[in-house]
């Protein structure tokens, strides 16, 4: 399958690895929007949040377990935000389920942060 993040998880395309276990892979986003900006992906291909089912939803729990471990190991003490973009309106550009982990700065919230267009 011609999927960028499958290739990154398999080590076929280079990335800056932060964490890896049997189920998930975490690496630095190539175009960070926060001082800490990692991507956490399941190693199994799922195209996005709309494709989560009772068969594969356990992988989402593995992603969040990894996030807690990563926060600990990377010294993220002041909190973090996890975002997944799904589909065109959300601006998903890579169609392999991924969770942005953002940290290292005080982040805004509210309608400007959530829904910048109208
Ligand atoms: P999204 O817009 O939610 O689909 O997020 C895709 C993310 O993947 C963006 O934040 C990109 O900067 C990031 N990205 C794309 N290609 C790479 C790459 N080769 N290595 C690391 N991050 C990447
Ligand atoms: Zn994939």
Image: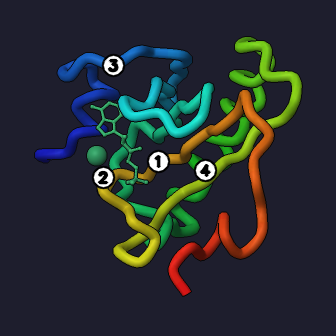
The residue under label 4 is 60
Q: For mark 1, does the 10 Å Cα neighbourhood hold few (<14), some (14 to 19), or many (20 or more) residues?
A: many
- Binning the other alpha carbons within 10 Å of mark 4 as few (below 14), some (14 to 19) or many (20 upward) gives some
Dot 1 and dot 2 residues touching (CB under 8 Å)? yes
Q: Residue at x 18, y 21 (%)?
A: 12
Does mark 2 have its CB less than 8 Å from ligand 1? yes
Farthest left residue in view: 2
Identify residue for label 2.
94
Q: CA distance from mark 1 to mark 3?
A: 15 Å
The Cα–Cα distance between marks 4 and 2, rounded to whole angstroms, is 17 Å
What is the C-alpha distance between the residues marked 1 and 2? Answer: 8 Å
The Cα atoms of the two marked residues, 1 and 4, are separated by: 10 Å
Percent x, y for residue 75?
79, 14
Q: Position of residue 90 (x, y in %)?
A: 46, 70
Quickly name the residue at label 3.
15
Residue drawn at x 39%, y 66% as measured from the top left: 91
Q: Foreground residue, 53 or 11?
A: 11
> On residue 98, which mark appears?
1
Marks 3 and 2 close (CB-CB < 8 Å): no
Asked whether the beta carbons under mark 1 and mark 4 sit within 8 Å of each other, the answer is: no
Q: Nearer the viewer, residue 60 or 81?
A: 81
Of labels 3 and 2, earlier in sequence is 3
Disc 1 C-beta below 8 A from ligand 1: yes
Residue shown at the point (35%, 74%) measured from the top left: 88
SS type, badge 4: helix
Seen from this angle, which residue lies furthest right?
A: 78
Residue at the image position 51 percent from the left and 80 percent from the top: 117
Question: With 4 as the anchor, is 23 left or right in this view?
Answer: right
User: Mark 2: few, some, or many residues within 10 Å (few <14, many ≥20)?
Assistant: some
Mark 3 lies within 8 Å of ligand 1 (Cβ measured): yes
């Amino acid at each position: 399958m011609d999927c960028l993040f499958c290739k990154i998880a398999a080590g076929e395309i280079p990335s800056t690895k932060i964490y890896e276990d049997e189920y998930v892979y975490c690496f630095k986003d190539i175009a960070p929007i926060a001082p800490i900006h990692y991507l956490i992906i399941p190693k199994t291909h799922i195209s996005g949040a709309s494709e989560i089912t009772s068969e594969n939803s356990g992988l989402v729990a593995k992603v969040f377990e990894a996030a807690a471990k990563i926060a600990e190991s990377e010294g993220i003490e002041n909190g973090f935000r996890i975002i997944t973009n799904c589909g065109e309106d959300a601006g998903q550009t890579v169609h392999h389920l991924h969770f942005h982990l953002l940290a290292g700065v005080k982040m805004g919230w509210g309608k400007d942060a959530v829904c910048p267009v109208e």
